[in-house]
Amino acid sequence: MAHYNTILHQLLQLVPRHVFDRTVAEEDADKYVKAFTCWNQFTVLLWAQIAGRDTLRDIETGLFGQSAKLYHLGLPVVKRSTLADANRDRPYAIAEKVFYSLLERCQALSPKHPFRFKNKLHSIDATTIELCLQAFPWARYATRKGAVKLHTMITHDGDLPEVVVVTPGNVHDLTPAKQGRFPILPDSIYVFDRGYLEFAWLWAINEAEAYFVTRLKEGLDYEVAGQHKPAAGKGVKADLLIRMWGDASSGKYPQELRAVVYHDEEHDVHYKFITNNFTLAASTIAQIYKARWKIELFFKWIKQNLKIKSFLGTTLNAVMTQVWVAMCYVLLLAYITYKTKCGYTWLELSRMLQTTLLERMSLIDLLRLHPSQPPPRAAPGDPQLTFSFA
């Protein structure tokens, strides 16, 4: 009978360890550490994410009860005070660097967006996670409320998170975008809701030779400069050229914009979209904005399935560390599904991993359990799934 490491051990083999170790060295994060290293901390936080443990005591008790299955990971006895100190003191940049390294690998495998155009498509939005203001005084949201806000950009190639910025809840959605935290790449299309409608930022996107699609706010003054094209396509009521009025708009965006008036028959609602893309069909502009719903589904998924609504520490560093480890787990799920074409959704795969995390079995055997897909194959001569990073 073949001998296998646990599923958790095999998952950790997918983490780019060279990136992790290099960042630890750059941050000097393991200085003076005697037993509980940064890698031990990352292992415990990843285990907690997958296993669904959301308190320090729960993690301590759970690991103690499974200690016989964890010796191969090199974990010492984990005390909740030790883990709390590590989350407070060790820089979150370590997990952040791992996230972006994983992202590169996932993007090389991810499926393309479903549209016929070749432009890269990105959605930008933010979601709020409420906190206790007394425990998180730095995360002020209102007079008596605390919260953190996850500002996120996803790529529609695989619906992957590609930028995540964590701020106190009172930071405006647009602030990270205006600070340049979301890279704007030429020829890409960026879609966002009306909360991001600030004409100076729209002009910055235009100057970067990229495109945007958003909704027009009610009450903004503009004049119709003419018809862009005859209204064509299901639901398209008008395809116009417009110029903005007023110093707050025309002075910041001096060129003409394209306005698409669209009727959503399902909800019986009219929408006005504006864009600087004058090439795509008006119906495609409407469908691009409709695709923005993918980022809302992403927020719903992570809130329901990741441990990011309760935190293991009250400092900004502890919160950021936990968020970045959670995002790393999302990319591990994506990498496995894209690499093996196993047929599982992220939710199905995460539930299977949760129930088999410390079982000694091959990950490839676990993925073979899907009834409707051909089994993924291991490398020749190797019974385990060998797609770890170099």
Image (tube, grey):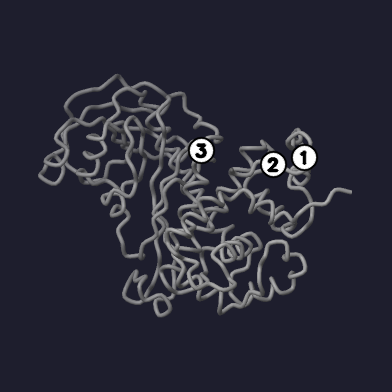
Position of residue 382 measured from the top left corner of the image (x, y, whole percent) = 77, 39
In the image, which disc is placed on residue 382? 1
Query: Badge 2 is on which residue?
Result: 386
- Contact, mark 2 vs mark 1 (Cβ under 8 Å): yes
| Helix, strand or loop under label 3 | helix
| Helix, strand or loop under label 2 | loop
**In this view, 236 is above or below 35:** above
Query: Badge 3 is on which residue?
Result: 107
Left or right: 5 as drawn, with respect to 188:
right
Q: Amino acid at mark 2?
A: Thr
Left or right: 76 as drawn, with respect to 296:
right
Q: Amino acid at mark 3?
A: Gln
- Point 41% across, 75% down: residue: 136
Label 2 neighbour load within 10 Å: few <14, some 14-19, many 20+: some
| Helix, strand or loop under label 1 | loop
Left or right: 223 as drawn, with respect to 366:
left
Position of residue 216 measured from the top left corner of the image (x, y, whole percent) = 27, 41
**In this view, 271 is above or below 70:** above
Q: Amino acid at mark 1?
A: Asp
Between circles 3 and 2, the one closer to the viewer is 2
Q: Quadrant of the image for the C terminus? A: top right
**In this view, 318 is above or below 107:** below
User: Total marks drawn?
Assistant: 3
In the image, which disc is placed on residue 199? none
Of the image marks 3 and 1, the number of the one nearer the N terminus: 3
- Contact, mark 3 vs mark 2 (Cβ under 8 Å): no
Of the image marks 3 and 2, the number of the one nearer the N terminus: 3
